[in-house]
Amino acid sequence: MLINKDMKMADVIHLDHHLLHVINRFNIQLGFEDKTVETVCKEYQVNTDFFLEIVNTYHDPSYFPLKNLQRFKPTLLVDYLQKTHHYYLGIKIPEIEQFINQLLLNNKIEPVHSKLLADFFQSYKTELTTHITKEEQRVYPYVKRLEGYLTQSIDKELITKEIKDYSIQEYEQEHDDVEAKLYDLKNIIIKYLPSPTDSSLFNKILHDLFELERDLNNHGRFENLILVPIVEKMEKDLLQKIKKS
């Protein structure tokens, strides 16, 4: 069942509560009353069509509207991706880290096992942070500048140099596979740590890791299948515009 603009936003949450953190990324807060998705989006000045494509992609793993998403402005997608970064580093990773610290303190785990889990988590956190920082500092500003160039008078030398110095193809090659290390982190807990005195913390950590993995997979699909082709087209259009001028 796909979500549509005429559904009540409250019913969307009842249908799939996992969408709460996705909806929050649009700065939409609870207190929907009986308002429809379209009404809530208008109140929060959110593009309704874009909102629906995003939430349906998270709601239904088989749903991925490639052509629909590629028609939106790159900055709209970049803004959403930046909000997912804030969710990862500002909310989800600290939450998982807090659970892991509780686990290490409360379950009398042998020092060798404590060190294994703590070190591996910190290694994953560092890799994810490095990956996100690279996108925030280089990739996303580059995308925004390209979009601006298409609507402004063109400085031929500046644009040609910028695309030559860094094209989106380079980003494709640099896109780290952080999902692989996340899989290894889950396996340490599932396979190699001794049985805990309190399995509830283990379950909480694993639940959050699986949710993070699902979210990161969608994030990567947005970047690789939507953002990259859009930017490649912008690069091509700009270079052709320069040739003709």
Image (spheres, rainbow, N blue to C red):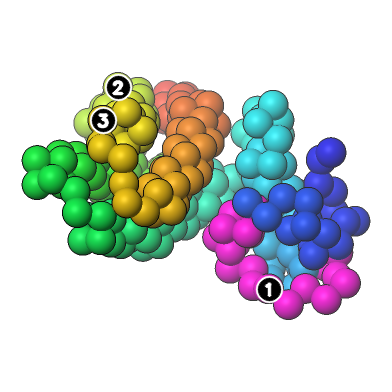
Report, in whole angstroms, how far the alpha carbon at label 2 lies from the one at label 3.
33 Å
Compared with residue 157, is residue 204 higher up or lower down, i.e. above or below? Answer: below
For discs 2 and 3, the disc positioned in front in the rendered view: 3
Label 1 crowd (10 A; few <14 / some 14-19 / many >=20):
few
Which residue was labeled with disc 3? 192
Q: Position of residue 54 (x, y in %)?
A: 65, 45
Disc marking residue 173? 2
Q: Nearer the viewer, residue 65 or 203?
A: 203
Rendering quarter of residue 174? top left
Q: Residue at x 53, y 26 (%)?
A: 225
Three-letter code for the amino acid on which mark 3 is drawn: Tyr
In the image, is 68 to the left or to the right of 108?
Answer: right
Three-letter code for the amino acid on which mark 1 is drawn: Leu
Three-letter code for the amino acid on which mark 2 is drawn: Gln
Q: Residue at x 19, y 54 (%)?
A: 108
Secondary structure category for the residue under label 3: helix
Compared with residue 163, is residue 139 higher up or lower down, i.e. above or below? Answer: below
Count of numbered circles on the image: 3
Look at the image and tell me whether residue 244 can be seen.
no
Rendering quarter of residue 185? top left
In the image, is 96 to the left or to the right of 53?
Answer: left
The range drawn in magenta is 19-39
Q: Position of residue 186 (x, y in %)?
A: 35, 35
Q: Residue at x 13, y 45 (%)?
A: 110
Q: Nearer the viewer, residue 7 or 188?
A: 188
Q: Earlier in the sequence, mark 1 or mark 2?
A: 1
Disc marking residue 30? 1
Is residue 121 one of those drawn in magenta?
no
Disc marking residue 49? none
